[in-house]
Amino acid sequence: MIDQKLDNTLQAISEFFNRYKVGYEGNKGYRKTTDLFKLHRAVEDLERLGLINKEQTVFWDLGCGDGRVNLFMSYLVKFSIGTEIEPTIFEECEIRKTEIEDALKKKHLLLPPPNMFLYLGDSLSKATQDAVFRHTGYLFNEIDIFYTYITLHDLFAEQIINNAKSGALYLVYGFSKILPSYDGMELVNPDVGKQNIMTLYRKL
C-alpha cells in the first residue's frame, strides 16, 4: 500500500520530471515521455486489483528514455528494469537520478531503493535480454509487467506473446478511444486509472 510519505515522494518525483516532459500523445514522433501524475493514478488501480506487489513484481519498461518510469516504479515493485535504444536519451538517466535524489533529500522524502537497472540496448534483441539477465538474474520470460509508451507497441506485443510467460501483463501508455487487439493477448482494462490514456493487456 502507498502510505502518506511514499505518496508525497511519488508526487515530488512526478513534479520534478514534469519539467522535462517532451513529445505528445500518438504513435508518431521521435521522443515522448510519460506523465508520471497519470502513471500514479494508474498504479493505484493496479494496486487495488492486486496486480502490483512490492515483494514479487518484476517490471520492465521496454523504452525507458531518461528512466523516469523506472525510478517511479522502483518504489512499488521488487525489481525495476529499463532498456533504451537511443544513446543520447539514455545519457540523461544518471543525470536525472542524481538530480531527483538531491531534491528528495532536501525535502526529507524517500530515496529510490537499490532495485533499478537501466541498460542501453534494443529491447527486442536477444543480446539485450541476455545482458539484462546477466545483471539482474531475470529472464524475459520471468517478467510480470511490461510497459511502453505507444511507439513500437505492436512489435513489443509480438515479443511478449512469443517469449514472455503466460499471464504476463502489458501496460501501454498513449491509447485513447481506438485500441488494438493482439492475437495471443486479452484486454484486461481499456482505461487504467480512468484517464483515457493507459490500457492493460495480459498474455494468454
Image (tube, grey):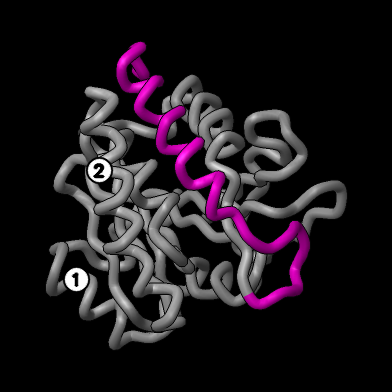
Residue extending farthest to the right is 177
Residue 1 position by quadrant: top left
Pointer 1 local density, CA inside 10 Å: few below 14, some 14–19, many at least 20? few
Query: Where 76 sits versus 5, above or below?
Result: below
Instruction: Name which of mark 1 and mark 2 comes first in the sequence.
Output: 2
Residue extending farthest to the top is 4
* Residue 22 percent location from the top left of the image: 63, 60
Query: Where 28 sits versus 178, above or below?
Result: below
Could you tell me which residue is drawn at 77 percent across and 62 percent down?
26
Dot 1 and dot 2 residues touching (CB under 8 Å): no
In the visual, does 93 lie left or right of 187?
Answer: left
Check disc 2 and report the residue beneath it: 101
Q: Nearer the viewer, mark 1 or mark 2?
A: 2
183 and 93: which is toward the camera: 93
Bounds of the magenta segment: 1-30
Query: Where 145 sits versus 107, above or below?
Result: below
Residue 165 position by quadrant: bottom left
Q: Which mark is residue 133?
A: 1
- Which three-letter amino acid code belongs to the residue tagged 1? Phe
- Which three-letter amino acid code belongs to the residue tagged 2? Glu
Could you tell me which residue is drawn at 70 percent across and 54 percent down?
174
Asked if the magenta segment contains residue 4, the reply would be yes
Residue 12 position by quadrant: top left
186 and 11: which is toward the camera: 11
Could you tell me which residue is drawn at 27 percent across and 63 percent down?
94
Asked if the magenta segment contains residue 9, the reply would be yes
* Residue 194 percent location from the top left of the image: 71, 29
